[in-house]
Amino acid sequence: MTQITQTNQAAFFNLSGVIRTLLIALTMLAGGTPIALAQTDYPNKPIRFIVPFPAGGATDNIARPLQNELLNTVKWNVIIDNKPGAGGNIGAEIASKSPADGYTWLMASVGTHGINLPLYTQGGGKLPFDPIKDFTPITLVAELPNVLVINPEFAAKNKINSVNDLIAYAKVNPGKVNMASSGNGTSIHMAGELFKSMTKTYMVHLPYKGSPPAVTDLIAGNVDIMFDNLPSSINFIRSGRLKALAVTSAKRSPAFPDLPTIAEAANLPSYEATSWFGVVGPANMPVDILNKDSATLMAAINSPTVKEKYLAMGAQPVGNTPTQFSVFIKNEIAKWTKVVKDSGAKVD
């Protein structure tokens, strides 16, 4: 009797598996969302973490503490793959076309998932991906201000010691101030464009493939100013190789409490241009994998080790749910659509 019962149970579970497979196939044929099968052994191979900017930049600096924490705490083998270019669009496109199996992540930013859609599509242009339809939001990782930095020799030569000094110089010398950025559409670019628009100044935008080469040229004196992400400039500010004039956030940064905001320094109360970074995957990730990724990443973001590293570089750790992050991205696109239109920013 026991043997018959075990045989019947095995047959039942085999039949159940067949039925589940058929239901999934029928659902997909009908145009519905496939039912996610349990992935209890996920991840059982390395996760490719695409960072769409060069190593050493703010996006990369935000990704690496997460990579280390996941390896040390849950033994997830996350491999960072830097794919810079086109304001983050190259890496984002690669991620959008990857399998939705949980083994490809993208470190999204305010550029790839906020600014680039209105910036690159104005005048009939087109992005190689849709920041909403082609991705699955997992969690918002961190937010941080940008910082207006200037080459110290340029500042000394032209007696620029404040934001108002810079505005005055730019107005008397239109087109003679070179403004570096980490690429078209990045928060660094748009912080500068918003500043130019609100101060009615003209400065020449010079886009680079990420912050590191731009900062290198800024230190060398090949360019004059930059609205850089704070993490990639913070050590150069502390060492005196760059001169900081103000931060772009609504409030002062705890990393530099004596440094004014642009809003207060230049009497521009509505000026604010901050950066954010979050993890997304390709569209239609299985629900069980999405939930596991979200919970694991949020635990890593809220760990004392990662928090300490983020705060030291001037970033504020966040961590939220996929639903909350999805709403956040949609709001960011709406916000930056207005900024792009009002500022007249364009891809150079």
Image (cartoon, rainbow, N blue to C red):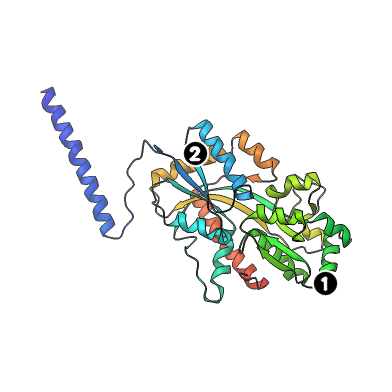
The answer to whether 221 appears left or right of 289 in the picture is right
Q: Nearer the viewer, mark 1 or mark 2?
A: 1
Asked whether 1 or 299 is in front, the reply is 299
Query: Number of marks in the image?
Result: 2
Query: Circle 2: is it few (<14), some (14-19), or many (20+) Cα within 10 Å?
Result: some
Asked whether 134 or 157 is in front, the reply is 157
Q: Position of residue 17 (x, y in %)?
A: 22, 41
Residue at 70% x, 40% y is 312
Q: Earlier in the sequence, mark 1 or mark 2?
A: 1
* Placement of the N terminus among the 4 image quadrants: top left
Residue at 52% x, 36% y is 70
Q: Which amino acid lies under the numbered mark 2 shown in the image of this protein? A: Thr
Residue at 63% x, 47% y is 56
Residue assigned mark 1:
173
Q: Position of residue 72 (x, y in %)?
A: 53, 31
Q: Position of residue 208 (x, y in %)?
A: 64, 60
- Report helix, strand or loop for mark 1: loop
Asked whether 57 or 37 is in front, the reply is 57
Residue assigned mark 2:
296
